[in-house]
Amino acid sequence: HQGWLNKSRVKMKINIAYPEYRSQQIIEIDDDKKLRIFYDRRISEEVAADALGEEFKGYVFKITGGHDKQGFGMKQGVLLNHRTRLLLDGTTGQYHPKRDGARKRKSVRGCIVGNDLSCLNVVIVKRGPTDIPKLTDKASDRPSTRGPKRANHIRAVWGLSKTEDVRKYVVRRKIPGKDGKPDQFKSPKIQRLITPVMRARKAHRFALKKQRYEKATAEAAEYAKIVAQRRQTARAALLSKKKAATSERKSVKAATTTTKK
């Protein structure tokens, strides 16, 4: 009987996200009848949320994950509704090996929803006729304070050409001023932005490279000229030496022949 009492007192947090408005809300449900719509469902399955209340009528949720009361996260592909131990190598998440080829047995929660979960993560894939405060109403649609930083990514988002200035389209964040001071705007530094300064620096690098090439070519030609001149001088000296030795031998031979006569 104690087990049935524990099941009737199930408490679970539902983390609801609406990606279109970048909003998120956590609700706590302690009614087992409302939670039954999620039981025995797997990750990536879609569930009609009509049983959660009148405000959720017509909404459809998609299960994206969750964790149990001990903090072990649900793992896609593990077809269990409880915790188990798997030998992980780091390629499927939930384990980061310090060395290549290392494996470790870790506890993971199966991908099937059960009453032992502490929190269940869902995403709204279909809206109902009524708006949910702080989740799907217009006040929840806050513009993103983050945007692309790279110049080509900004051009891709706004459909700009290479000749247009992308600095006008970067996301800016407004910071209200305090004590009567004017408002300030912050924006990220655009990466890989081609500016006149960058073109000048690139031209300067190419000019230096060209100068080094011309200098090296001139020095190599001068060195080759000096080497050729030294070889010619050494060859001339060797030929003169050979000629002197030949004439000396001829004179010695002539003197010996004269003496014999």
Image (cartoon, rainbow, N blue to C red):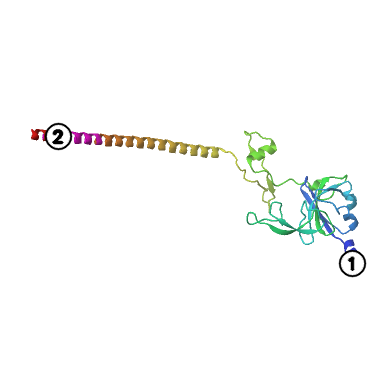
Q: Residue at x 9, y 33 (%)?
A: 258
Q: Residue at x 43, y 38 (%)?
A: 212
Residue 214 lies in the magenta stretch: no
- On screen, residue 51 versus residue 201, left or right, reads right
The kind of residue tagged 1 is Gln
Q: CA distance from mark 1 to mark 2?
A: 134 Å
Residue at the far front in the pictured view: 260
Residue at the far bottom in the pictured view: 2
Disc marking residue 86: none
| Occupied quadrant, residue 155 | top right
| Occupied quadrant, residue 198 | top right
Disc marking residue 2: 1
Give the position of the N terminus as an image quadrant. bottom right
Which secondary structure class fits the magenta region best?
helix
The kind of residue tagged 2 is Lys
Q: Residues within 10 Å of mark 1 (few under 14, many from 20)?
A: few
Q: Which percent across, then down, holds residue 219?
A: 38, 37
Q: Residue at x 89, y 49 (%)?
A: 50
Q: Nearer the viewer, residue 134 or 2?
A: 2
Q: Residue at x 78, y 49 (%)?
A: 23
Q: Which percent across, then down, holds residue 11?
A: 85, 60
Q: Nearer the viewer, residue 6 or 169?
A: 6
The segment highlighted magenta reads 238-255
Q: Which percent across, then down, holds residue 118?
A: 81, 59
- On screen, residue 49 versus residue 166, left or right, reads right
Disc marking residue 253: 2
Dot 2 falls on a residue whose secondary structure is helix
Does the image show residue 168?
Answer: no
Q: Nearer the viewer, residue 188 or 223?
A: 223
Q: Nearer the viewer, residue 146 or 124?
A: 124
